[in-house]
Amino acid sequence: MKKIIGSPGTMSGLILRLGQCATAAASIGVMVSAYGFSNYTAFCFLVASMGLQLIWSFGLACLDVYAIRRKSDLRSPVLLSLFTVGDWVTALLALAAASSSAGVTVLFTKDTEFCSQQPALSCDRFQISVGLSFFNWVLAAISSHAMFWILI
């Protein structure tokens, strides 16, 4: 099997998964702390998507820790297929949620100036959360890309 950065059961894979967990948790935390986020579907979708990403990445990080401690190989074709499909699904959901939330955020801050008319909204927090979710997507894309190349 090929040695690629981000492979399951390696230290680089563990660091990649922990980065995904951290950015997903931070994105959720910032968005949930923003006043009025639950009134907009795109922001709720972002929280749900990042929640799924957090659960998926944490589960795979736990598998990486187990494989590193036991010095076992997680690169069987069945496991790699499962990891690849799971990474693709979570990466696509993260991109869709980040993009839709970014669209709503740009609409609020630049196009309609809704944020300046509604000072109670936490538009800065919306922007921070969207930025974190895009960074999470970059990490998920790296992971899914690595899984794809290991699989083929």
Image (spheres, rainbow, N blue to C red):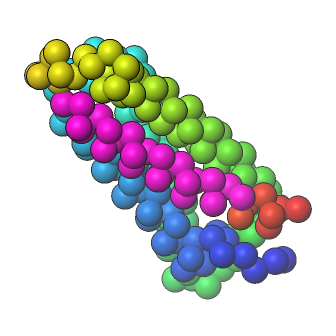
Residue 48 in view in this figure: no
Residue 132 counted in the magenta span: yes
Position of 139 compared to 31: left or right? Answer: right
Residue 78's place in the image compared with 70, above or below, is: above
Q: Position of residue 122 (x, y in %)?
A: 19, 30
Q: Residue at x 75, y 80 (%)?
A: 3
Question: Which quarter of the picture shows residue 30?
Answer: top left
Give the residue drawn at x 30%, y 26%. Answer: 109
Task: Answer whether residue 147 is visible to the viewer in this image.
Answer: yes
Quadrant housing residue 45: top left
Q: Is residue 133 left or right of residue 128?
A: right
The spot of residue 17 in percent (x, y) is: 50, 63
Most foreground residue, 128 or 17: 128
Majority secondary structure of magenta residues = helix
Q: Is residue 89 left or right of residue 79?
A: left
- In which quadrant is the N terminus drawn? bottom right
Residue displayed at 29% across by 34% down: 126
Quadrant that contains the C terminus: bottom right
Q: Is residue 67 above or below residue 18?
A: below
In magenta stretch: residue 12:
no
Count of labels in the image: 0
Q: Residue 135's spot in the image, x, y percent?
A: 47, 53
State which region is magenta: 122-145
